[in-house]
Amino acid sequence: MARVTTEIPPAATQPAGLPGEDWFSPGSVWLDDHGVAINAHGGGLLFDGGVYYWFGEHKVAGPAGNRAQVGVHVYSSHDLYHWSDRGIALAVSDDPASEIARGCIIERPKVVRSTATGKYVMWFHLEFRGHGYATARAGVAVSDTPVGPYRYVGSFRSCAGVWPMNLPAEQRVELSEAELAVFTRRGRPSTRPTTTTTSSRPAPPPALWLRRDFRGGQMVRDMTLFVDDDGHVYAVYSSEENDTIQIAQLTDDCLHTDGKYVRVFPAGQNEAPVVFKAHQKYWLITSGTTGWAPNAARLAVADSIWGPWKKVGNPCVGTAREMATTFGGQGTFALPVDGGVIFMADRWNPRNPIDGRYVWLPVQFRDGVPSLAWQERWDLRELANGANRALAPAKGTSMTGP
């Protein structure tokens, strides 16, 4: 079972602010120490050695920015407000034969540090160049330092040759030749898999995609990494043609899944998973599958990372439009900070990806349930001292994450 260093980030006592500011301004242009817009989309944060590291997709202008032209950018901060540009952590390759050749798709990079090897390990959703969204693999890279450069290790699909722990025994059957033929005729196209929540084709049985991919491994698309209190690391990703969320435990070196995994809400069509732990419960926020267009967030809860998971509803509160679109964004990560949790989301701009904006909001608890409300600006004092006092964990509990 994978274990990594778990360090709880402290809240800033004196918010320093973005350049010229002392608060978070969701949806605004956020600048780095050079006065340049931060370019770290679909990102995740690592807290290591008293420093925050923000990893994200480096976008360029125009439609070409929807594919990886540069790689994964990294920034560092001591207070979550001021961010220093640390360069490209993982660069795309100029070798057209490389799996991460320029023009491939690299999405949602996340980094953890493994205590088994001492290495920093980056995971991301990878699509080979020219394959649209049909590859659906997890890409992995490693580094001796948080900022890199990261060395690309390879890619794979998850848990090949293993059935999920919560799959009924009667469904643990590989596809017959007849089923495979029907699947080939009726299967969904593998271009942009999240363009719609419906299909004109007959809906396949919920486990059909799972059974199809049993030997070769399960699809990995929108993904995140979650570090539990005990240091075990889990990959949480959209799989089965975006029909189902899967949660898989990582190996000790964090370079692969170890074969222990579950399915969450089969055929529920969820993506963009965000996971955090608070009040001795596990919380999962996902989105529907409407491509780049925002939709209503979905909240679920469980007493164990393995489930069973229970649907709670929409965590967003506000106007009908805000609730229907998650404030125009889609979740990417949950950052635990002493006294609270920050929900991180992106406002995608597929016509000009470099102009995608970041929406960070404090998670608030209402009657014991996480909620998100729009704030034009806010600072970390709200997490530690103010409106989110209810986020403080009960005695003997803690909130952890990568």
Image (cartoon, rainbow, N blue to C red):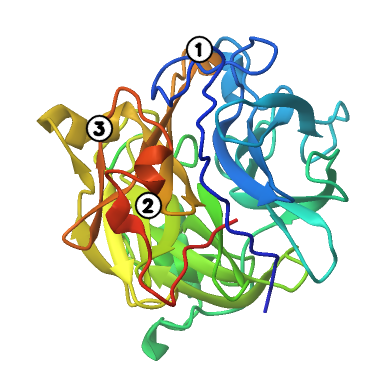
Q: Are marks 3 and 2 in contact (CB under 8 Å)?
A: no
* Picture quadrant of residue 383: top left
Mark 1 falls on what kind of element?
A: loop
Q: Report the residue marked by disc 2.
A: 186
- Please state which of residues 104 and 228 is positioned toward the viewer in this rendering: 228
Tell me the quarter of the image containing the N terminus. Answer: bottom right
Q: Mark 1 to mark 2: distance in Å?
A: 34 Å
- Label annotation for residue 127: none
Residue at the (31%, 37%) spot, across then down: 196
Q: Residues within 10 Å of mark 1 (few under 14, many from 20)?
A: some
280 to 141, vertically: above or below: below
Count of marks, rendered view: 3
> Which residue carries the number 1 mark?
352
Mark 3 residue element: helix
Q: Nearer the viewer, mark 3 or mark 2?
A: 3
Indicate the secondary structure of the residue bearing disc 2. Answer: helix
Q: Which mark is residue 325?
A: 3
Taking the image as shown, residue 244 lies to the left or right of residue 50, namely left
Relative depth, front residue between 86 and 351: 86
Image location (x, y in percent) of residue 73: 70, 30
